[in-house]
Amino acid sequence: MLNSCREFQELLHSVCERTPGESILLSGGLDSSILLFYLRPREAITVSIDPYSSDYRYSTVVAKHYSKNHHIVMPRIEEIFENLEELVRDFKTFDPIFLKNSVVQLLGFKEAIKLKVNAIILGDGADELFGGYNFLCKYLKSPEVLQSKLDEIAQNMEFASFKLSKKYNLGITTPFLDDTIVKFSRSLSVNDKIAVHNGIIYGKFFLRNCFKEILGDEIAWRRKEALESGSGMNKILPYLENCITDEDFLAGLSKAKNEGVLIRNKEHMFYYRIYREFFDAPIHEICDQPGKSKRCPSCNTLFIWNGSFCKTCGAYPV
């Protein structure tokens, strides 16, 4: 693996040398920390709901070494709500996981615009190409199934960042999605990507092993966290739930069911209410490609996609 690490480090270094970017969205996770090490942008931006999130902690650690200016954005609840509504409207979705992850990115983009930078660096692609998602770890002893899951993820990569960047005229750079990096990732075995370290199964094992000496064990072996978790965005849940009384929730469940939508909890209903302010119920969508689309069993959205979850309501599997 040592030679492969050297080859990869040289490849990524070469990609980063031709990568523009005055700022980076820094979570302090493995991916953004690797890019911070190579690129050293003028501005590093971290979104954290408070000073107690793991992103706040780890980004502070790595920024001390490789960042000139570290900006930590701690948005107000009202500001988070406003941006969640914007995402529901722009992406036509009430998927809780997508919204809570994407609101972190949106808030980071808006901070970059305030700082008057032209482009922002993102770690998009590392999880998809190098096996970063936690659910993959359970397939460690089933290499054929694991390879199938990895292939499915890589073939269905899609990032909200591209649409957001166009809306706000903010350039984005994604070194992990460079063709040379994508090609290299395909040369790795499933055991390179998912493996055991100190009795714990880790995704992105190859990247962790390659950069442990550069970034240190604290960053290299940090457990994978979604943006919603690392940023502390999950802490908005009580505020969302307080917006809906138990009586309203029961009435809303019945109304949504009549519209062909299965609501899972108050948070889901909060987003669905916003969705219905802008869009008709998904069941009324008309199929313009008969025979090529299917309906989500949980919300009746029509979609043509090879993935395993519904982009509208977040149902899994579909």
Image (spheres, rainbow, N blue to C red):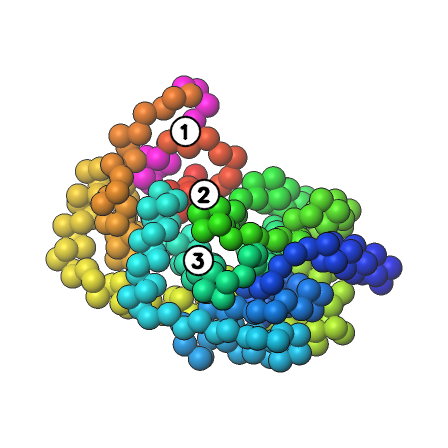
Label 3 element class: helix
Q: 22 or 127, which is in the foreground?
A: 22
| Number of the front mark, 1 or 3 | 3
Alpha carbon separation for disc pair 2 and 1: 12 Å
Q: Would residue 47 be visible to someone looking at this image?
A: yes
* Most distant residue in the front direction: 116
Q: Earlier in the sequence, mark 2 or mark 3?
A: 3
Is the Cβ of the residue at disc 2 closer than 8 Å to that at disc 3? no
- Dividing the picture into quadrants, the one containing residue 257 is top left
Q: Is residue 269 above or below residue 108?
A: above
The amino acid type found where label 1 is placed reads: Lys
Label 1 element class: strand
Q: 266 or 180, which is in the foreground?
A: 180
The amino acid type found where label 2 is placed reads: Phe
**Circle 3 is placed at which residue position?**
106
**Circle 1 is placed at which residue position?**
294
Label 2 element class: loop
Q: Would residue 139 be visible to someone looking at this image?
A: no
The residue under the point 27% across, 39% down is 279
The residue under the point 81% across, 58% down is 10
Q: 204 or 70, which is in the foreground?
A: 70
Residue 7 image point, x, y percent: 83, 56
Q: Main secondary structure of the magenta part?
A: loop
Q: 197 or 122, which is in the foreground?
A: 122
